[in-house]
Structures are given as C-alpha cells and as structure tokens.
Image: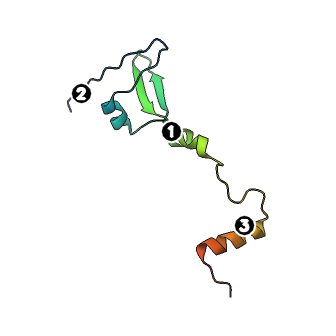
Amino acid sequence: MKSKEFVARLTSKNQMTLPKGVSALLNVGPGDSVRFEVEQDGSIVLLPAPVRERLAPLVGRNRRGAGKSPAAIDAELREIRGDIEV
C-alpha cells in the first residue's frame, strides 16, 4: 500500500486543523477527540480517542428515569413499548 503524506500548520496557540484526508481516515469530525501516542523510537501515532471517551460528555444527558421509582420507570417503559397488561 502506498503511504500518504498530509501536512498541517500550527497556529500561534499551538493548534492545528487536521487535514480532511486524516480526519476521514480516523473517522473523526468536529467535537471528536484524538489521541497522540509517542512510541519508544520517538515517532508519534495519531489515533481516534476510544469511543467511551468520545461519548463521555453525553453520558447521563436527558435521563428520563432520573428520580423515579422502579415501578414508575417500568410503567413508563411499558407505555413506550406499547405493552398490553394482561
């Protein structure tokens, strides 16, 4: 496989924009995190952050059952699923 080369320039604040080809290869976009790993030989590997880390800001948002009793949650789930009580 032929290697590809991409170049990014650092701003005065040490920020850079990932080239479109790199973000496509990493499958990352605006708001996603990336991880830099420094190898023993000094080379640096750029990886997408683990999914768990990328989803961390969303955990717990819009929790429908917060503060409800288990019976109330069960009733709400039955209503959402359309369960028919026998």
Taking the spot 31% from the left edge, 20% from the top edge, the residue there is 7
Q: Is residue 27 left or right of residue 13?
A: left
| Residue 4 image offset from top left, x and y in percent | 25, 27
The local crowd at label 1, few if under 14, some if 14 to 19, many if 20 or more residues have their Cα within 10 Å, is: few
Which residue position is annotated with label 3?
A: 73
Disc number for residue 62: none
Which residue position is annotated with label 1?
A: 50
Which residue position is annotated with label 2?
A: 3
Q: Quadrant of residue 28?
A: top left
Q: Secondary structure at mark 1?
A: loop
- Marks 3 and 2: which is nearer the front? 3
| Residue 5 image offset from top left, x and y in percent | 26, 23
Q: Secondary structure at mark 2?
A: loop
- Marks 3 and 1: which is nearer the front? 3
Taking the spot 49% from the left edge, 33% from the top edge, the residue there is 33
Taking the spot 46% from the left edge, 24% from the top edge, the residue there is 37
Q: Amino acid at mark 3?
A: Ile
Q: Nearer the viewer, residue 49 or 78?
A: 78
The answer to whether 49 is drawn above or below residue 8 in the figure is: below
Q: Is residue 12 left or right of residue 83?
A: left
Taking the spot 72% from the left edge, 66% from the top edge, the residue there is 73
Label 3, label 2: how many angstroms apart (C-alpha)? 53 Å
Q: Nearer the viewer, residue 53 or 68?
A: 68
Q: Amino acid at mark 1?
A: Pro
| Residue 72 image offset from top left, x and y in percent | 76, 69
**Residue occupying the far left of the picture:** 2
